[in-house]
Image: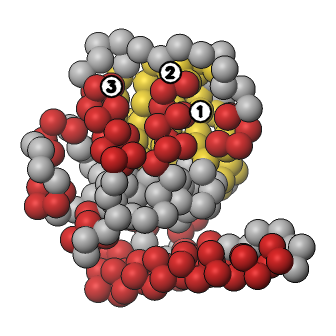
Amino acid sequence: MQTGPLKFKTLILSDIHLGTKHCKAKEVLEVLARISYEKLILNGDIIDGWSLKRKGGWDKDHSEVLNMIKDLINDPTTEVIFTKGNHDEMLEVVLDFPVAELGIIQEHIHPTIKGNYLITHGDRFDSVTQKHKWLAILGDIAYQLMMQINGIYNKYRSWRGKDYYSISKATKAFVKKIVSSKDDFNSQIVAAAKEANCVGVICGHIHTPKDSYIEDIHYLNSGDWVESLSAIVENPNGSFKVVYYDALSKCFN
């Protein structure tokens, strides 16, 4: 369906957060349309039901992304896997089309020439999301407010000749680091991979792109499309790489 100079075996996106004011829907749409891939994995928090329940920030660009995803699902030349994230809730209430058409599943096993990878959003490793949902929702509201503060703060930094600095991203990363440490995140990743007979785990959720090893388990995180604008691609030779919109866009015709 897509044509262009960039050709990958698999494209993995997460944390697009359609329905929030700071979602980079135009950039997502461009990546989906300008990259060639055989398989598309949407690894959770694609549509933000939490935000939409609070009226959110849905606009025509968000509708275009959703329509393209639906078209890809119906395209026999592209395999689409859509896994559930913690924000992918109440979609039947906030969206005016049959959500079942998206075929959302909990997790997915992705085969590669090096072995299987567990595709899971990552909220299963987060005790706050799992056991204290009210606190997670409160944190999400605070994050949205900090995104607005970012705009004001960075106008001041620009006036002073300084580079962009994300207060919201730094705060979110700090909080996630504390929670991950408390939850023994690394041990959970390794245990989940071994339980699923996988050599690697690919997550989203924490909005921080990552390509590393935890013991002998390959851990990848696709980041987000609110601030990082990052994704994971699988090359034809089976290798994975974290990529960013700024670099990808320079290769578009």
Q: Looking at the image, which residue is at 68% across and 48% down?
A: 211
Q: Looking at the image, which residue is at 46% across and 77% down?
A: 144
Between tags 3 and 1, which lies in front? 3
Q: CA distance from mark 2 to mark 3?
A: 11 Å
Q: Is residue 46 visible?
A: yes
Nearer to the camera, 10 or 126: 10
Q: Label 2's element?
A: strand
Q: Amino acid at mark 1?
A: Val
Choose top left, top right, bottom left or bottom right for residue 127: bottom left
> Pointer 1: what residue?
233
| As drawn, 244 above or below 163 | above
Q: Amino acid at mark 2?
A: Tyr
> Pointer 3: what residue?
72
Nearer to the camera, 58 or 15: 58
Q: Quadrant of the N terminus?
A: top left
| As drawn, 199 above or below 125 | above
